[in-house]
Image (tube, helix red, strand yellow):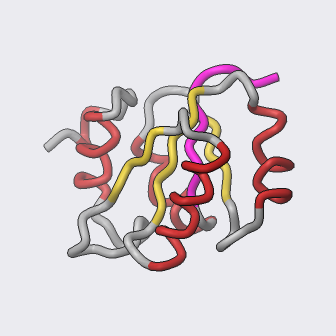
């Protein structure tokens, strides 16, 4: 069982945008869009002991996922991109790094603003 931080994102592009920034072992899980309760539980069950974080887009789909997480995993901390960028994948890596750093993730020095 993986212990540590689990970051839940919507898609593979989000994961690929965030992965190079992190300098610690973080499990990044993809919902692949809006999912239901059953699929969410299946996705997260193997990571029961993890600290849960979400990083969803600033759109309707992201809001639905945040609401679903709030109902079923209220302990999860929500990270948010700026409305200017709307999507995690289009947010500059240095901006993502600043958001991750504020949430106490370890990031590579070249991404520090």
Estimate the x, y position of residue 13 in percent, counting from the top left: 55, 68
Which of the two residues, 88 or 16, is positioned nearer the viewer here? 88
Which of the two residues, 8 or 90, is positioned nearer the viewer here? 8
The magenta stretch is 1-9
Residue at 24% x, 64% y: name it. Answer: 82
Residue lying at the far front of the rendered structure: 71
Residue at 34% x, 33% y: name it. Answer: 103
Give the vertical position of 18 relative to 113 (above or below).
below
In the rendered view, does 2 fall on the left or right side of 85? right
Give the vertical position of 38 relative to 105 (above or below).
below
- Quarter of the figure with residue 89: bottom left
Which of the two residues, 20 or 15, is positioned nearer the viewer here? 15
In the rendered view, does 1 fall on the left or right side of 103? right
Is residue 8 highlighted in magenta?
yes
Q: How many marks?
A: 0
Residue at 34% x, 40% y: name it. Answer: 100
For the N terminus, which image quadrant? top right
Estimate the x, y position of residue 33 in percent, counting from the top left: 65, 73
- Quarter of the figure with residue 25: top right
For the C terminus, which image quadrant? top left
Residue lying at the far left of the rendered structure: 113
Estimate the x, y position of residue 61 in percent, counting from the top left: 54, 76
In the rendered view, does 101 fall on the left or right side of 46? left
Give the vertical position of 85 relative to 66 (above or below).
below
Is residue 68 highlighted in magenta?
no
Residue at 20% x, 39% y: name it. Answer: 112
Estimate the x, y position of residue 65 in percent, counting from the top left: 57, 63
């Amino acid at each position: 069982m993986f212990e540590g931080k689990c970051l839940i994102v919507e898609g593979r592009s989000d994961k690929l945008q965030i992965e190079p920034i992190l300098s610690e072992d973080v499990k990044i899980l993809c919902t692949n869009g809006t999912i239901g309760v059953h699929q969410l539980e299946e996705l997260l069950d193997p990571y029961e002991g993890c600290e849960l974080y979400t990083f969803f887009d600033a759109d309707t789909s992201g809001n639905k996922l945040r609401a679903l997480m709030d109902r079923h995993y209220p302990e999860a901390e929500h990270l948010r991109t700026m409305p200017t960028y709307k999507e995690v994948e289009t947010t500059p890596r240095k901006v993502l790094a600043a958001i991750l750093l504020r949430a106490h993730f370890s990031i590579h020095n070249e991404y520090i603003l």
